Structure formats: C-alpha cells, structure tokens
Image: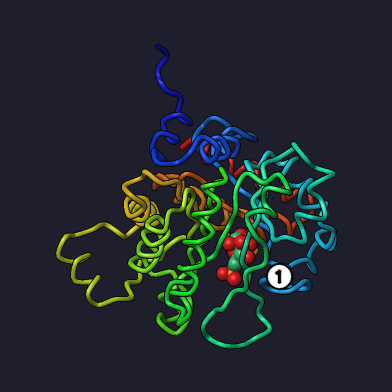
Amino acid sequence: MASKTRVQEILSWYESDNPGSRRNLASILNHGRLGGTGKMVLLPVDQGFEHGPARSFGKNPAGYDPWYHFQLAIDAGCNAYAAPLGFLEAGAGEFAGQIPTILKLNNADSLYGGSDPAPAITGCVDDALRLGCSAVGFTIYPASALRSEMYGQLREIAEEAKRKGLAVVVWSYPRGSGVSKEGETAIDVVAYAAQIACQLGAHIVKVKPPTDFIEQDAARKVYEAEGIPIGTLAERIRHVVQSAFNGRRIIIFSGGPAKGRDEVLEEIRGVAAGGAFGSIVGRNAFQRPKEEGMALLQEIMEIHAQA
Ligand code: FBP
C-alpha cells in the first residue's frame, strides 16, 4: 500500500471526527497553491465588522465590495476565505465551488468601549451548510470576563458543526480585564490560548505571533527553571505548536496591522521556521492594491512551502 500523504497524516490526528468533517478539513488542506503540502494560507475579512469600514477598507476602497475579497483569495491561491455572514452571503453563489469558505459565527464590533470583549453570535451552523462552507469559525477571548460564556457557546457550536460534518476553526485571542496589553501576545499567554482552543475541540487554531514577554509569574518560574527557549520568534512559535497538542492540531498565525513587505516577510520566515502550519493574513493583503496584495500572499505561501 502506498505510504500516507501529508494530508492523510494530518487527518489521522482527528481520529474521533466523522468523514464529513475530515473531508471538509481536507478540502482546505488540498486547495490553492499550498494544496497537498500540509500548509495553508487563509484570507480572513471580518475587519469591517471588528474595526469598522473606513479603518478596514479606506486604504484600498476596492475592498468595500464583498466580491473583491473572494476574487483576491481565489487569484492569490489561498486555501480558504473566511468572513462573517453578510460578506459570504453576498458572494457565495457567484463564487460557489471556487474556493473553500469559512463562516465566522461570532463577531465583536469596536463601538462599545468596554475592556472585556463581548462578541455576538452572528450566524449558525445551518447558515454555513446553506452557503456551502467547509468550516465554521469562532473567536474566543481568553482573559475576557465573559470568556466562560464564549467557551460554552463554542462547545455547542463545535458539537453541532462536527455532527453535521463541518470543520471548526477557532481564533483564540487573549484580551480583556484579565490580561495586560503587553500580555495579549506574551509567550505564556499565547501558548495557553492555543491549548484552550485545542481542548475546546478546534480542528484549526489561529493565534497571534508571540513576543518574549511573560505575563504570569507562575509560568515565568517554569520557563526559567526548565530553560524553555523563547529568545527567537522561531523558538516561540515552536513552543506554541508544542502547546497545540505537540503539533497534532493545525495551528496558524495572524498577520496583524498593515506593515511594510520586508517586515511582513521577516515575521513569516520566523513563523515558518518554528513549524507553524501556515498564516492567516487579512489587512496586509486587502489593504494593498490588488496586484501587490496578491504578490505578498504568494511570497508568504512560498516561504511556508519551502519551510
Ligand atoms: P489581520 O491579518 O488583518 O490581523 O486579520 C486576522 C484577524 O484574525 C482577523 O480575522 C481579525 O479581524 C483581526 O485579526 C483582529 O485584529 P485585532 O486583534 O487588531 O482586532
């Protein structure tokens, strides 16, 4: 018998999932320029909801049009495109079958200034099925006073999504009154956030690239006593991958606010060298003119392909 492909190997880690969920996970892993490599680059466009339209699309007004993002993800060769209900409903028919999609089922706006994020449920598993999505997406904010509510909502959504044969993607963003601003990307906090998302049953976890700051004193003692290497970005990524079930869960890292090409690529090199499964890059792609955004996404894919 032929040996397992990399995608089959990854699917074998999700051993309790039904064939539908595995097939949908495979549809993401097998699509686009990185298809079949076990790596992925996703385009997420929920910033219109999360940050508002001008902050999101003012730099490149073509992005006000929902079709722009479908086409960008397709033309760049991304593995999948993720968005909230409205953006997906606006293009799911026109672009059906051209790229796997992920319906984000909760969203938080930035109009209410409280320190603890309180996202609303903005879609359901049946919406994802109706729109032909491969997966549902959900954001948890560990460190928000409302985190337990979010964990409970995700538990219910993940149970239904898996029963109905979809994959589950979790954005795990520590934020809120339980963590300092610097602590949101602290190595101990990001690793912890990855672990929580995996324990909640995520197939794919998305976190931010961690810094070498350590937020929790109890964790610092262990990092120091055990000499856990966190000096370089690659070392920190490796530690986060290890925290995601020792690499048995797909874990990808976000792009962050728009910055220069060299800075983006330098960070991606560290992310790839640390053993990440890929990147999820929104603003750095769609806030550039289309050709430039596409070219940057493709350079990012190339770095992951070579790692
Ligand atoms: P970006 O590459 O634009 O950072 O997109 C990734 C993402 O996870 C989006 O899905 C989300 O809207 C955004 O980051 C959240 O960014 P922030 O932490 O700045 O609110």
* Residue 259 seen in render: no
User: Left of 157 or right of it: where is 248?
Assistant: left
For this rendering, which residue is in front, 32 or 23? 23
At 62% across and 42% down in the image, what residue appears? 299
**Residue 192 at x, y = what percent?**
35, 64
User: Left of 84 or right of it: where is 235?
Assistant: left
**Residue 78 at x, y = what percent?**
65, 42
Q: Quadrant of the N terminus?
A: top left
Q: State the residue lying farthest toward the left.
A: 225
For this rendering, which residue is in front, 151 or 177? 151
Up-down relation of residue 278 to residue 86 (above or below): above
At 37% across and 69% down in the image, what residue appears? 189
Q: Which amino acid does label 1 sit on?
A: Phe
Q: How many labels does the image show?
A: 1
Up-down relation of residue 103 to residue 307 (above or below): below
Mark 1, secondary structure of its residue: helix
| Mark 1 residue crowding within 10 angstroms, few (<14) / some (14–19) / many (20+) | some
Up-down relation of residue 265 to residue 259 (above or below): above
Residue 51: image quadrant is bottom right
* Residue 156 seen in render: yes
Q: Is mark 1 within 8 Å of ligand 1?
A: yes
Residue 87: image quadrant is bottom right
At 76% across and 47% down in the image, what residue appears? 72
**Residue 158 at x, y = what percent?**
51, 55
Which residue corresponds to mark 1?
49
User: Left of 236 or right of it: where is 63?
Assistant: right
User: Left of 252 or right of it: where is 119?
Assistant: right
**Residue 288 at x, y = what percent?**
74, 57
Where does ligand 1 appear, by image quarter? bottom right
For this rendering, which residue is in front, 271 or 248? 248
What is the basis of the colouring in this image?
rainbow
At 40% across and 75% down in the image, what residue appears? 183
